[in-house]
Amino acid sequence: MPNIYSNGLRLNSPHSIEAISETDLYQIILAQKGVEKKQPAPPKKLGLAYSLKNHVKNLKMVRWGIIWYPNDSKVTPAEKLHRQYLQKLIDLRQTQMGYNLPQLLFESGWTAPDFLQQNGVSTGDMQTAAVPYYLLIVASPERIPWDFQQQLDGEYAVGRLWFDDPLDCQRYVEHLLAYEAGAPAKARETLVVGTRHNGDPITQSSAPELVQPLYDWLKADPDGRGYQASLLLGDEWEQEALRYKVLDRLKGTAQPAPALLFTATHGLNEPDDPATCGALVMQDWPGEPHPLKLSYCLAGEAALASLPLEGMLAFCFACYSAGVPHLQDWVHPATGKAKVLAPVPYVSRLPQKLLAQGLLGFIGHVSKAWDFSYLGATLASPHIGSFKETLAQLMDGLPVGHALDALNLRTLSLSGVVADMLEHPEKYQDEQQVINTWMARNDCRGHVLLGDPFAAIRV
């Protein structure tokens, strides 16, 4: 059986990607039954009650809250500074709600259902007076794990803020408050960036199956939003997805910077290096057999420090673009254990620095990204409806946390099928179907939000 390729490149390596055979992957999937059974069941329904669907921008009705790590003797100086720098945002959201924030604390080892139960709410029965719809986790993923965020995000609109430098938290809050108070909005434009490298199956897939169809849909503007669309794609003449061209567009050098950025590239696969892991590999990398250099990537604090990103949202489809978990998201049949990716989980440096420059929110990927989230069940046609819906809601000015519902809904739908496949494998004789469904579920689940989930583009 053929190989399956993942997103992600290593520095100083001429090889484009890691690969796994479909035969090995199928055996890995069958071995997950016991592991999956230990995971909390997904909610039976997604998000807000029908009566609140038209009120997602009304905090008096759907509410907003912060999930903290308990304020005890274990609280670190960095956590105390994050709490201090967030106070102005808390004050604003409390005024908008007309309510004080509820005390929402996370205890080590809790699952999302544990957290909800401790606050008097059942999974699948949202009560925003007890647990608000918009939830902002303020902690490192070492303290409040990525999988807790992903579980909770299946029902609620969840974001996370955590910065290696707490002053970046202060900068993010100041930019967000200034923008919401009426700072000039970005141009009504979506910039789509996609790489396409020689000898590289993953970008040779994402360029025609994800990037180009999304751009064509945005350019056609079928719903009359009035957004312009622009494209930097692969090595095409005069619109190459080169690092300097992307930076020039974000700086607004020759034309106003866009309000929305979508990228589909490799992410730098260096989980043991928090400073570079998740950096976006631009078209500067010529492809195999050339070794990858950091200068080919969108990374580095010096380059990002001059970007005026206030009022912009970013959706970056790339391996580790949002962060890195401690363990791989599957166990290997031979060992019964998951591979250790990093000594401790963390938020990638790139989104931290983009948020500190004024980015409203960053949708990225935790762990590896594959092509299953945008390919159909047969891998023969693109399945980009959830990507379109997410971008459409962002362009409509809906809060970024709510806009992720489209991808979360697909995750929940696929999770139900995966559970049945693992429980009753005799019903699913098509190995390709099993692989595609399981991988698509993992791929969709990997998307998380960094930033305030109530942040939105002004329209």
Image (tube, grey):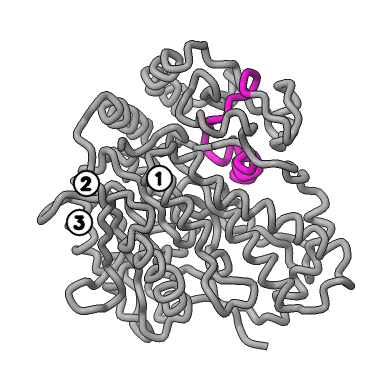
Graded by Cα atoms within 10 Å as few (under 14), some (14 to 19) or many (20 or more), the crowding at tag 3 reads some
Residue 96 marker: none
Which residue in the structure is indicated by mark 1?
394
Residue occupying image coordinates x 44% and y 33%: 452
Disc 3 is placed on an element classified as helix
Tell me the CA gap for discs 2 and 1: 14 Å
Report if residue 72 is visible in the image.
no
Q: Is residue 80 left or right of residue 37?
A: left
Query: Residue 411 placed where, x, y %?
Result: 64, 54
Query: Residue 429 placed where, x, y %?
Result: 82, 78
Which residue in the structure is indicated by mark 3?
249
Residue occupying image coordinates x 31% and y 25%: 177
- State the residue in front, 364 or 84: 364
Disc 1 is placed on an element classified as helix
Q: Compared to 435, does 357 lie above or below?
A: above
Q: Which quarter of the rendering shows the N terminus? A: bottom right
User: Picture quarter containing residue 281?
Assistant: bottom left
Of the residues shown, which amino acid type is indicated by label 1? Leu
Graded by Cα atoms within 10 Å as few (under 14), some (14 to 19) or many (20 or more), the crowding at tag 1 reads many
User: Picture quarter containing residue 119?
Assistant: top right
Which residue in the structure is indicated by mark 2?
187
Of the residues shown, which amino acid type is indicated by label 2? Ala
Asked if the magenta segment contains residue 142, the reply would be: yes
Residue occupying image coordinates x 68% and y 29%: 126
Q: What range of the chain is rendered magenta? A: 128-154
Residue at the left extreme, as displayed: 254
User: Picture quarter containing residue 102?
Assistant: top right
Q: Compared to 161, does 377 lie above or below?
A: below
Query: Residue 12 placed where, x, y %?
Result: 37, 74
Q: Is residue 188 left or right of residue 432?
A: left
- State the residue in front, 307 or 301: 307
Disc 2 is placed on an element classified as strand
